[in-house]
Image (spheres, rainbow, N blue to C red):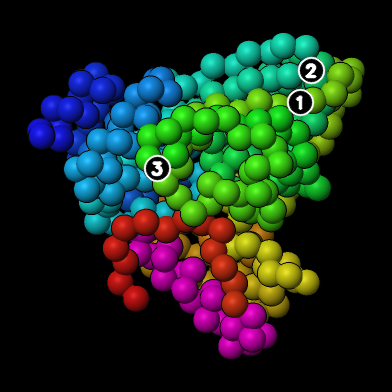
Amino acid sequence: MDFLSEAKKIVGEENFFTGERMDKHTTFRVGGPAKYMAAPTLDVQVQKLLALCGSAGVPYYVVGNGSNLLVSDEGFEGMIILIGKGMSEIKVNGCRIIAGAGVLLSRLGAAAAGAGLRGLEFAAGIPGSVGGACVMNAGAYGGELKDVLAGVRAVAPDGGLRKFAPEELGMGYRRSIFSGGGYAVTEAEFLLEPDDAVKINARMEELAARRREKQPLEYPSAGSTFKRPEGYFAGKLIEDAGLKGRGVGKACVSEKHAGFVINKGGATAQDIYDTIKMVQAAVKSEYGIILEPEVKIIGKFCD
């Protein structure tokens, strides 16, 4: 089997790439080349890609907006399946919205507000896509995706396509049944509530203002770098450990919000990785608490 030829047949040559740099596809703005990258536009293409990778023994990783991802400077020795603009249709039907996995949450929130539907205001400022948000049960300001999800369509590692009901998703804090990897979310359905569009937009603007005030949006980052340890706040632990502004190379802990590791400009993926490790070691030494990264890390790094 000619892997390259088969992959190109599935998505078309215009949607298949070799050596595509991942710094163009992550919000950290770092990452080396992916050996292969495919950008499917249909569920059936995703199914065929997963089956192809399985039969050829080629590792794969599913990526949306790359807002929760750190890829090594060496890149990824496999196939990146990019669920993006080609799978970004939005349909509004009464109080339900069906969105492709490539839809940005900012666009989804705007569509909901435009339709006079509330429930997604918290998500409008999260710099991710619908697919990634389903995988990690994205949340902010007291809201979580599980509160409004009515179903998720996804391709399993064996290539099977099925729709999951909300109770099957196993959603908790920054996790779902998809968190272990292998699945490719292709579509999600949301059940919202009608409300006045002016009120919805006012709430969204209020949350956007809070983000601008408290988060280092002027620097490349992956949002909150660490999960919240039970009974604590990661940012508070990091700040109390005196780590604001500290880092490795061109990466550091944000002075504005200690929960963010940022790329100050010109950082390598290794700089960011080393800064994450530095923070973990310092917090463990100071408080005996192990911070778990919220950011997914793929590729080879030096420890």
Residue 157 is labelled as: 3
Residue at the image position 53 percent from the left and 51 percent from the top: 179
Among the two numbered marks 2 and 3 on one chain, the one whose residue lies closer to the N terminus: 2
Is 8 on the left-hand or right-hand side of 95? left
Among the two numbered marks 1 and 3 on one chain, the one whose residue lies closer to the N terminus: 3
- Magenta-colored span: 266-289
Which residue in the protein does label 1 denote?
191
Give the residue type that dot 2 points to: Cys
Residue 73 in view in this figure:
yes
Distance Cα–Cα, label 2 vs label 1: 6 Å
Rendering coords of residue 276 (x, y %): 49, 68
Give the residue type that dot 1 points to: Leu
Rendering coords of residue 6 (x, y %): 17, 27
Q: Which of 255 and 78 is in front in this view?
A: 78
2 and 3 marks in contact (CB < 8 Å): no
Q: Which of 129 and 41 is in front in this view?
A: 41
Instruction: Please tell me whether mark 1 or mark 3 is closer to you in this view.
Output: 3
Is 61 on the left-hand or right-hand side of 246? left
Number of other residues with Cα within 10 Å of mark 3, as a class: few under 14, some 14 to 19, many 20 or more:
some
Distance Cα–Cα, label 2 vs label 3: 32 Å
- Judging from the image, what secondary structure is the residue with disc 3 in? loop
Quadrant position of residue 299: bottom left
Residue at the image position 61 percent from the left and 35 percent from the top: 164
Residue at the image position 63 percent from the left and 20 percent from the top: 98
The N terminus lies in quadrant: top left
Quadrant position of residue 251: bottom left
Give the residue type that dot 3 points to: Pro
Distance Cα–Cα, label 1 vs label 3: 27 Å
